Amino acid sequence: MPCILIVEDNEMSRDMLLRRLQRRGYRVLVALDGAQAMHVARHELPDLILMDMSLPVMDGWQLTQQLKDEATTAHIPVIALTAHAMAGDREKALDIGCDEYESKPLDFGRLLGKINALLQRKESG
């Protein structure tokens, strides 16, 4: 089963995603800040990353750019998650390399659809 890295500093959001994804059979890794996420992504090479954009240490914007700039992690699909959805944030997220964008509060069914589509695209590509 695919491995998903959740990069989320909010405990309630993180735990909700963790439980729901595990229930669907995914292997789930967790990082609480950008620096920890970079380490996990480099060493575990997850199949997909759910990226909160407002993180301590290094925010999701910087982290995504770094991941996409590195040959070993550039192929990993990233879904941007943000509670502070502002006009232009979706375009900004896609411009820095995110493959998808989802605003909070999350619609888990819609998010799951995006996860499945990206994982299928990755397998066939």
Image (cartoon, rainbow, N blue to C red):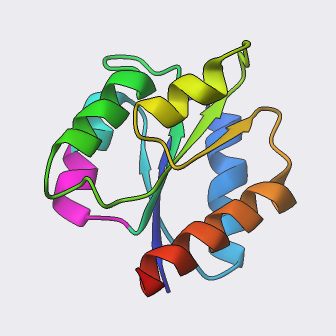
Q: Relative to the observer, which residue lies in front, 100 or 84?
A: 100
Quarter the C terminus occupies: bottom left
Q: What secondary structure characterizes most of the magenta part?
A: helix
* 43 on left or right of 32: left
The correct choice, above or below, for 65 with respect to 97 in the image is: above
Taking the spot 65% from the left edge, 73% from the top edge, the residue there is 116
What is the count of numbered marks?
Answer: 0
Q: In which quarter of the image is residue 66?
A: top left
The correct choice, above or below, for 14 with respect to 120 in the image is: above
* 52 on left or right of 49: right
Q: Quadrant of residue 67?
A: top left
Taking the spot 50% from the left edge, 86% from the top edge, the residue there is 1
Q: Relative to the observer, which residue lies in front, 94 or 63?
A: 94
Taking the spot 41% from the left edge, 40% from the top edge, the residue there is 97
Q: Where is residue 45 in the image (x, y as percent from the top left)?
A: 26, 64
Q: Position of residue 13 (x, y in %)?
A: 69, 39
Taking the spot 69% from the left edge, 61% from the top edge, the residue there is 114
**Magenta region includes residue 116:** no
* 14 on left or right of 95: right
* 109 on left or right of 17: right
- Tell me if residue 65 can be seen: yes
Highlighted range, magenta: 39-46
- Tell me if residue 8 can be seen: no
